[in-house]
Image: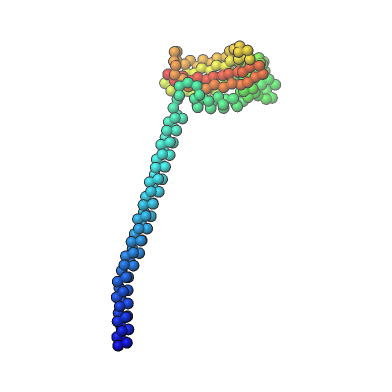
């Protein structure tokens, strides 16, 4: 009888293992499938986010390029502004010491206002010729080009608001046009300010 009871006990234990083992396997399978679906969903969200960021970045680059290339009517144009900044730092052909040294553009502007001479030549005339040369080297003008013509003006304004025109370069822009791009710069001097402006006509 004791032997029979032991066999029955073992037999019952085996049946219990048979019952619970598939359920345990199914539980692990469900968990693994849940983790897999969760990871897949997370990866899809990351990929979608990266795609949105890339699209937005590309659109911003395109719009920025269009904005920078576009000629804006009036003053404050990027192209002419950069030109004037660079022009201020160039070395001109003006020397007042027999060619030992030459004046930078910003120095020549002041020298012109003071009525100085570049080795016997009128400094304002030297400045005017140099400015014309630099503008016409930087752009092509004409009816067949986008830039039709230009005008460059330089004047001195005293502390009492008296204006004196130093010179004007007329690059033969179209008569009566209102569409242009341009920029202004100022140089402070002891008793006033020197202002110069470049306008490039577009039509």
Front-most of 31 and 81? 31
> x and y percent of residue 144 in the render?
42, 21
- Identified at 64% across, 22% down, the residue is 107
* Picture mark count: 0
Front-most of 37 and 128? 37
> x and y percent of residue 148 in the render?
45, 19
- Identified at 45% across, 21% down, the residue is 73
Q: Quadrant of the N terminus?
A: bottom left
Front-most of 20 and 76? 20
| Image position of 161 (left or right of 143) | right
Q: Tell me the quarter of the picture where residue 121 sits.
A: top right
Front-most of 105 and 157? 157
| Image position of 134 (left or right of 192) | left
Residue 69 sits above or below residue 194 on the image: below
- Identified at 32% across, 70% down, the residue is 21
Q: Tell me the quarter of the picture where residue 109 sits.
A: top right
Residue 30 sits above or below residue 162 on the image: below
């Amino acid at each position: 009888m004791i032997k029979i009871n032991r066999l029955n006990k073992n037999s019952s234990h085996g049946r219990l293992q048979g019952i619970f083992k598939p359920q345990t396997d199914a539980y692990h399978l469900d968990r693994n499938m849940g983790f897999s679906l969760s990871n897949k969903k997370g990866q899809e969200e990351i990929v979608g986010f990266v795609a949105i960021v890339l699209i937005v970045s590309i659109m911003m680059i395109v719009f920025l390029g269009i904005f920078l290339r576009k000629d804006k009517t009036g003053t404050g144009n990027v192209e002419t502004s950069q030109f004037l900044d660079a022009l201020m730092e160039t070395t001109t052909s003006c020397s007042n010491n027999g060619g030992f040294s030459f004046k930078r553009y910003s120095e020549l502007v002041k020298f012109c206002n003071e009525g100085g001479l570049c080795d016997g030549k009128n400094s304002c005339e030297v400045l005017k010729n140099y400015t014309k040369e630099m503008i016409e080297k930087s752009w092509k003008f004409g009816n067949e080009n986008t830039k039709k013509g230009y005008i460059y003006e330089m004047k001195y304004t005293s502390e009492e608001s008296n204006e004196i025109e130093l010179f004007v370069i007329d690059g033969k822009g179209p008569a009566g046009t209102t569409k242009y791009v341009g920029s202004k710069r100022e140089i402070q001097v002891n008793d006033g300010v020197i202002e110069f402006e470049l306008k490039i006509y577009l039509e």
